[in-house]
Amino acid sequence: MSGWIWSGFFMTIFYSGLSRIPDTFIESARLDGAGSFRIFLWIELPLIKNLLVLALLIVTTGGFKGFDLFQILLRRDPMEAGIVLPTFLVRTFFENRDIGYGSAISMVLTAVVILIMIIINLVNKKYVGAVEEY
């Protein structure tokens, strides 16, 4: 459900990225006989790849903050089958009053988010940096 919340934001970012691609690129591809799909795949997509990585970074880090939706929907889950790490963290820290264990969970969650951000940034530097800016 949180994907629908952010969809307008990402559509605006992708639209602005696509609109700043010069028309000469598209026109020359059409003169070479490329269709709409090939133009998107080989011209537009590589030029907005940095925006795709930005969207991936925002979605990934935002996914680890998913507390409110699960807390509202699964508040009284007897088996705790749908519990996610941030919900488990808050329940451990505040409801069970286990501050040490809750702090350890929060440090692990922070380390995982930082590790994922580093991996995404390394992939960004490797693949997105290969595309020349126009």
Image (tube, rainbow, N blue to C red):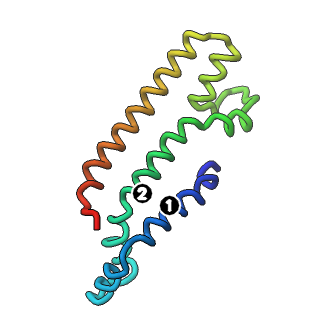
Q: Residue at x 29, y 85 (%)?
A: 28
**Mark 1 in CB contact with mark 2 (< 8 angstroms):** yes
The secondary structure type at the circle numbered 1 is helix
Side of 77 relative to 107 (left or right): right
Residue 22: percent from left, percent from top? 36, 76
Q: Residue at x 40, y 52 (%)?
A: 53
Q: Quadrant of the C terminus?
A: bottom left
Q: Residue at x 43, y 30 (%)?
A: 112
Q: Residue at x 74, y 36 (%)?
A: 72
Above or below — where is 105 with respect to 98? below
Give whichever of 101, 62 is nearer the camera: 62
Q: Which residue is mark 1?
A: 13
Q: Earlier in the sequence, mark 1 or mark 2?
A: 1
Q: The disc labelled 2 sits on which kind of residue?
A: Leu
Circle 1 crowding by C-alpha within 10 Å: few under 14, some 14–19, many from 20 = some
Above or below — where is 102 with respect to 123? above
Give whichever of 67, 23 is nearer the camera: 23
Alpha carbons under labels 1 and 2: distance apart: 7 Å
Side of 85 relative to 117 (left or right): right
Residue 36: percent from left, percent from top? 40, 81
Residue 56: percent from left, percent from top? 45, 49
Q: The disc labelled 1 sits on which kind of residue?
A: Ile
Side of 105 relative to 114 (left or right): right
Q: Which mark is residue 51?
A: 2
